[in-house]
Amino acid sequence: MQAPAPHNLIASAGKIHLLDLGALKERLGSKWERMAEHVQLFFETAIRRSLKPGDTFSRFGELGYVVMFRDLSAAEAELKCAAISEEVCRRLFGENGLTIALRNLVAHVGLATIPSGEEQTASLDALLERDGKETIVGHRSATEPGGPASRSMRISINGNPSTRSRVSMSDIGYAYRPIWDSINHVVLTYLCQPTLPVTPSNAATGFCVADDEDDQTILDLHILRECVERSVRLRTAGLRVILAAPIHFSTIGRAKSWRDYSGILRQIDQEIRRDIATVVLGIDHGVPHVRLAQDLPKLSRMAYRVFCIVDRCQGTGARFAKTGSHGIGIALDEKDDEPQSALRLREIAKETQSAAIESFVLGLRSTSLALAAIHAGTRYLEGPIVRPAVADPRHGFAHDIEDLYKTKRAAR
């Protein structure tokens, strides 16, 4: 078999540079001279880590770089540049409490355009400025008034007043809960779970709910950004899983909140959006079908899949029919009575089957309930008995009924 001709190979180029460099220098004053070399070395180290054999990069201007990716499509090169920019923003400028923005330009180019000198680098830069797809990766200082990390809000677990506490956004951590597809016998999806320092056990079953609707939107956006950044890093490393981001129904239903949330969704590269599912919580049993049919399709058109949590099973099939929802399910609490939980499992499975929608259950703690869910026809299962939450989801893997017993033995 002959090797592919050079003209059949692909190559893409990217330009990464710091916006408003003059403003940054002005803010830092004399500190800039001491930081400049450190910033440049860190920037270039981050780029080198992302390069493969045959890739090259050239410095172009002050804190500007042109990068050539030999065997990547433009979409793949965009992910690489985004990952580099995220790392520089977070680890370098973020640690120094600075507000910055990096501009990325990416375009498909021919192999003959690999720069070998200043003139060719300038020519490639001109091509990128003319034809490149632009994205802005920004970091807002945690110490800046109103910055996300400095904001605090009152949050409870599942709306329970006894768990309510005031939490700074910088104190929110994340765990990822593996979701088992019992039909395909795999775990490919991880539910992104915000965790609070005052209630670390909430990673098992609970959802964070803000008292104020504006705060809830900010929390939902914070979770979405966490999923997007992690997905970009995974793709850059050659890995891929589906990350499910919780979102409160009020964020979809309120015009202002949805405008902010959907604006972020539209900015996400289509390849990354394919890796982001959503889990909608806060749907009261009194919300009618007409409202669900109006609001949920807005999300289903933009996210990979939409899963909805309900508090009552009766009538669920009719309420969620033709809403664009992929799955409807329930979240069990650790205090729930097992016979009653088993009854709810059967009810939700029956309701969803009548509407040709998949069913799911979160928070499973016993093998008997997991088996009952499977027997009822539930497709997606999550909980400590299935697989414990992880801090760093990186791989999909095969999983079957016998693995439930392995997990149980490991927990003893």
Image (tube, helix red, strand yellow):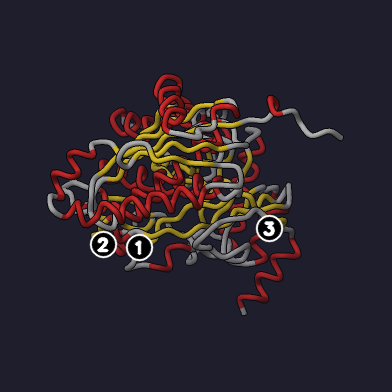
Quadrant showing the N terminus: top right
Query: Compared to 93, does 70 lie above or below?
Result: above
Q: Amino acid at mark 2?
A: Ser
Q: Earlier in the sequence, mark 3 or mark 1?
A: 1
Nearest to the eye among marks 3 and 1: give it. Answer: 1
Q: Earlier in the sequence, mark 2 or mark 3?
A: 2
Residue 382: image quadrant is bottom right
Please tell me which residue lies in front, 290 or 314: 290
Q: Is residue 32 left or right of residue 241?
A: left
Which residue is at a point 28% across and 58% down the rendered structure image? Answer: 95
Q: Earlier in the sequence, mark 2 or mark 1?
A: 2
Nearest to the eye among marks 2 and 3: give it. Answer: 2
Disc 1 marks which residue?
A: 196
- Mark 1 element type: loop
Number of labelled discs? 3
- Mark 3 element type: helix
Q: Is mark 2 in CB contact (under 8 Å) with mark 1?
A: yes
**Residue 269 appears at what percent x and percent y?**
48, 33
- Mark 2 element type: strand
Q: Is residue 307 left or right of residue 37?
A: right
Circle 2 crowding by C-alpha within 10 Å: few under 14, some 14–19, many from 20: some
Nearest to the eye among marks 2 and 1: give it. Answer: 1
Please tell me which residue lies in front, 192 or 80: 80
Residue 198 visible somewhere in the drawing: yes
Q: Is mark 3 in CB contact (under 8 Å) with mark 1?
A: no
Q: Amino acid at mark 1?
A: Leu
Please tell me which residue lies in front, 226 or 56: 56
Q: What is the C-alpha distance between the residues marked 2 and 3?
A: 36 Å
**Residue 59 appears at what percent x and percent y?**
39, 40
Circle 3 crowding by C-alpha within 10 Å: few under 14, some 14–19, many from 20: some
Disc 3 marks which residue?
A: 372
Disc 2 marks which residue?
A: 165
